[in-house]
């Protein structure tokens, strides 16, 4: 996943369905990622991600690069717009088949429009 993001020259990355934040930790370790957002429907998962990232102990400059957002991935959310890349790692298999079109529409709305 990290190689694909680097190949895409992504700097602003969404981790949709971030869970406990394993990928977020990897992204935060690399300065190329200037804005990192982890989104999950589960407040418990987001608290785990916050602890895994050690947000309360990060230097301000690093902490400002990462944000956690509680949201359902099958609904449009303006906070998730304009990013270079969106990752859905181990997410699709947890979405009911009839909700997949809503997920696709919501994710396609996160893309940064190229000029």
Image (cartoon, grey):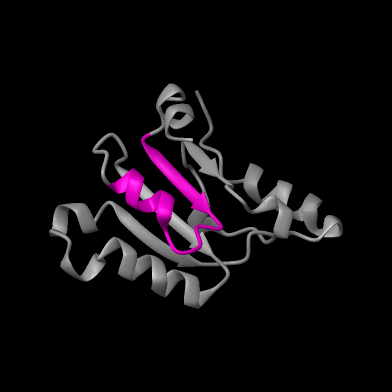
In the rendered image of this protein, does residue 4 appear above or below residue 22? above
Q: Residue at x 61, y 51 (%)?
A: 90
Q: Nearer the viewer, residue 54 or 107?
A: 54
Q: Quadrant of residue 33?
A: top left
Q: Residue at x 46, y 25 (%)?
A: 8
Q: Residue at x 40, y 74 (%)?
A: 47
Q: Residue furthest left?
A: 59
Q: Residue furthest right?
A: 98
Residue 71 placement (x, y as % from top left): 56, 67
Q: Is residue 96 magenta?
A: no
Residue 40 placement (x, y as % from top left): 54, 64
Q: Is residue 18 magenta?
A: yes
Magenta highlight range = 11-28
In the rendered image of this protein, does residue 39 appear above or below residue 90? below
Residue 9 placement (x, y as % from top left): 40, 25
In the rendered image of this protein, does residue 9 appear above or below residue 19? above
Q: Residue at x 36, y 60 (%)?
A: 67
């Amino acid at each position: 996943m990290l190689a694909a993001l680097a190949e895409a020259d992504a700097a602003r990355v969404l981790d949709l369905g971030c869970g406990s934040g394993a990928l977020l930790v990897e992204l935060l370790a690399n300065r190329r990622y200037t804005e990192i957002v982890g989104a999950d429907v589960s407040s418990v998962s987001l608290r785990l991600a916050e602890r895994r990232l050690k947000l309360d102990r990060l230097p301000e400059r690093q902490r400002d690069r990462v944000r956690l957002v509680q949201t359902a991935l099958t609904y449009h959310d303006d906070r998730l717009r304009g990013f270079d890349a969106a990752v859905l790692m181990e997410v699709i298999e947890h979405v009911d088949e009839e909700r997949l079109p809503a997920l696709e529409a919501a994710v396609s709305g996160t893309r940064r429009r190229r000029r």
